[in-house]
């Protein structure tokens, strides 16, 4: 038996195609993290196993999904991913005969409407197919990964991943993730941010994304993607700077207004 776990939040434009691509599975579970659009209305057409949460991190949601699943194998699929027919057939054969504890699945990444296959996107492996008896836990509030017993296998076929659909989607996602990332860095005791640290991060991450990961050598989309990745990390460090201040910025502005009203 195979269970599919999908995490959602305001995915009304993409969730139907995702669900269509996995409706062959024995069980579909939706772990919703606070949708206020038509996502759950659409999901109810495919499953009645819908669990509602609010502002949980991805590792927590993935663990909750595993707890509720009934399958011997569990496949995690994001709302912007599609299980293509060749991958479906491979998964069905794999869970029948395999002795591996988990499988990594590569992704065909569609960025700004074009398939990208360079740098970190060339071998974009994600561990998503897990044998339940060998599963231990998901860890990490962002960039989460599973712990499991046994060996890791690799599929021949890939997910279709419809990511970086437009600037709004990328920026909003970066803003949301930066809150978690900055908090983790603060709790880990990151040195206090300063002007020279910002400059160093800007230079090093531009080199990492543009040169080391070859973004600047892969046309217009490669350049745009590299710079957006730099932006995403830079926002994290700006948030970290805010968190490191002795007084919250909102409090400072409240005090300014209080002084103004007194005068």
Image: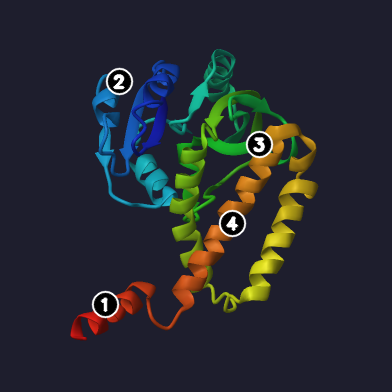
Which tag, 3 or 1, sits closer to the chain's start?
Answer: 3
The residues tagged by marks 3 and 1 sit, at their Cα atoms, a distance apart of: 50 Å
> Is residue 156 or residue 53 the one in the foreground?
53
The residues tagged by marks 2 and 4 sit, at their Cα atoms, a distance apart of: 37 Å
Which tag, 3 or 4, sits closer to the chain's start?
Answer: 3
User: In the rendered image, which residue does mark 2 sit on?
Assistant: 46
Going by the image, does 168 lie left or right of 151? Answer: left
**Quadrant in which the N terminus appears:** top left
User: In the rendered image, which residue does mark 1 sit on?
Assistant: 257
> Is residue 14 or residue 150 the one in the foreground?
14
Give the residue at x 33% y 33%: 30
Residue 52 lies, in percent from the top left, at: 25, 42
Does 43 sit above or below residue 69?
A: above
Give the residue at x 38% y 26%: 13
User: In the rendered image, which residue does mark 4 sit on?
Assistant: 233
> Is residue 242 or residue 97 the one in the foreground?
242
**Quadrant in which the C terminus appears:** bottom left
Residue 124 shows which numbered tag?
Answer: 3
The residues tagged by marks 1 and 4 sit, at their Cα atoms, a distance apart of: 32 Å
Does 147 sit above or below residue 87?
A: below
Going by the image, does 167 lie left or right of 257? Answer: right
> Is residue 218 or residue 180 the one in the foreground?
218
Q: Quadrant of residue 254?
A: bottom left
| Dot 2 alpha-carbon crowd within 10 angstroms: few under 14, some 14 to 19, many 20 or more | some
Query: Total of numbered circles in the picture?
Result: 4
Comparing labels 3 and 1, the label whose residue is closer to the camera: 1
The residues tagged by marks 1 and 2 sit, at their Cα atoms, a distance apart of: 52 Å
Residue 112 lies, in percent from the top left, at: 59, 30
The residues tagged by marks 2 and 3 sit, at their Cα atoms, a distance apart of: 29 Å
Comparing labels 1 and 2, the label whose residue is closer to the camera: 1
């Amino acid at each position: 038996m195979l269970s599919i776990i999908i995490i959602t939040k305001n995915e009304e434009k993409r969730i139907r195609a995702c669900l269509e691509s996995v409706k062959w599975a024995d069980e579909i579970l939706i772990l919703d993290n606070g949708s206020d659009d038509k996502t759950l209305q659409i999901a109810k057409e495919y499953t009645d196993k819908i669990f509602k949460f609010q502002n949980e991190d991805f590792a927590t949601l993935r663990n909750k999904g595993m707890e509720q699943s009934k399958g011997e194998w569990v496949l995690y699929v994001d709302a912007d991913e599609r299980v293509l027919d060749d991958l479906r057939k491979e998964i069905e054969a794999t869970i029948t005969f395999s002795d591996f504890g988990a499988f990594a699945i590569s992704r065909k990444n569609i960025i700004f409407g074009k398939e990208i296959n360079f740098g970190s996107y060339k071998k974009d492996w994600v561990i998503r197919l897990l044998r339940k008896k060998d599963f231990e836990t998901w860890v990490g509030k962002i960039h989460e990964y599973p712990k499991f017993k046994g060996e890791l296998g690799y599929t021949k076929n890939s997910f279709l991943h419809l990511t970086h659909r437009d600037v709004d989607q990328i920026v909003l996602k970066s803003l949301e993730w930066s809150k978690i990332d900055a908090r983790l860095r603060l709790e880990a005791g990151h040195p206090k941010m300063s002007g020279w640290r910002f400059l160093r991060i800007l230079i090093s991450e531009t080199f990492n994304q543009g040169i080391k990961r070859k973004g600047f050598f892969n046309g217009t989309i490669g350049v745009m993607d590299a710079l957006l990745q730099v932006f995403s990390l830079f926002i994290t460090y700006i948030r970290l700077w805010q968190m490191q201040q002795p007084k919250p910025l909102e409090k400072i502005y409240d005090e300014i207004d209080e002084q103004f009203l007194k005068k």
